Amino acid sequence: MLSILLWVFGNYKTLNFPGYEGFTGWTSFTLIFLILFVAMKGFNLIGGQCLNPMLADVIDYEYYVSGKYCPGTIGALFNLADKIISSLGPTFVAVLCALIGFGDSLPTAEDAFSVPLFAIGILGMYGFALAGLIVNLICMKYYKLTPEYMKEIRAELDQRA
């Protein structure tokens, strides 16, 4: 959210990095952008590390409920869902770009600034991730595989073995 506010209210025209034409030094916008970008990527890595334990819990739960041990199938379903969702972001951005007049090619740095193009850039950079986090929060509210419940499941599975 802070990054979106930076882009809306900050002077984005001062964003520049060493090696780019016209670099005259670090600007406050560039430094704040870098700090927020690194923080965003760091928090994204934290969420990604939750997938493997959750996948193991789902595999154990399926075995507990159905009696079928199918880690390959469950892993493939998780992978398929991830690939489908990951491919929708760029597709949606391309469709939005086509709707504002970029039907033959995607925008480049040489294209003139426009508010619709700016909005699509913010949506593509932050909006999809923010929407995904909101969906995750809603899903986790109804996620019933709590640590306590998983202890019960594992105890039952240990007794079955």
Image (spheres, rainbow, N blue to C red):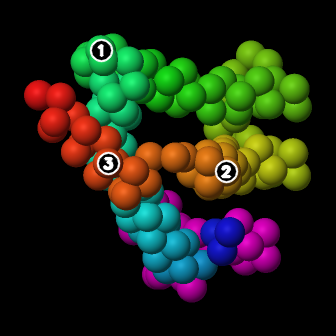
Image height of 149 relative to 92, above or below = below
Tag shown at residue 25: none
- Mark 3 surroundings within 10 Å by alpha-carbon count, few (fewer than 14), some (14 through 19), many (20 or more): few
Point out residue 35 in the picture as x, y percentages from the top left corner.
46, 76
Q: Quadrant of the N terminus?
A: bottom right
Q: Are marks 2 and 1 in contact (CB under 8 Å)?
A: no
Q: Earlier in the sequence, mark 1 or mark 3?
A: 1
Image height of 43 relative to 51, above or below = below
Tag shown at residue 68: 1
Point out residue 42 in the picture as x, y percentages from the top left corner.
38, 64
**SS type, badge 2:** helix
Tag shown at residue 138: 2
Look at label 2 and name its amino acid. Answer: Ile
Q: State the CA–CA distance, disc 1 to disc 3.
A: 18 Å
Q: In the figure, residue 80 lies in which quadrant?
A: top left
Tag shown at residue 152: 3
Q: In which quarter of the image is the C terminus?
A: top left
- Mark 2 surroundings within 10 Å by alpha-carbon count, few (fewer than 14), some (14 through 19), many (20 or more): few
Residue at 78 percent across and 30 percent down: it is 97
Which residue ends up furthest to the bottom in the rendered image?
28
Residue at 81 percent across and 50 percent down: it is 119
Specify whether 138 is left or right of 45.
right
Magenta-colored span: 4-28
Image height of 39 relative to 58, above or below = below
Q: In the figure, residue 15 lies in which quadrant?
A: bottom right
Specify whether 98 is left or right of 46.
right
Mark nearest the camera among 2 and 1 is 1
Point out residue 7 in the picture as x, y percentages from the top left corner.
71, 68
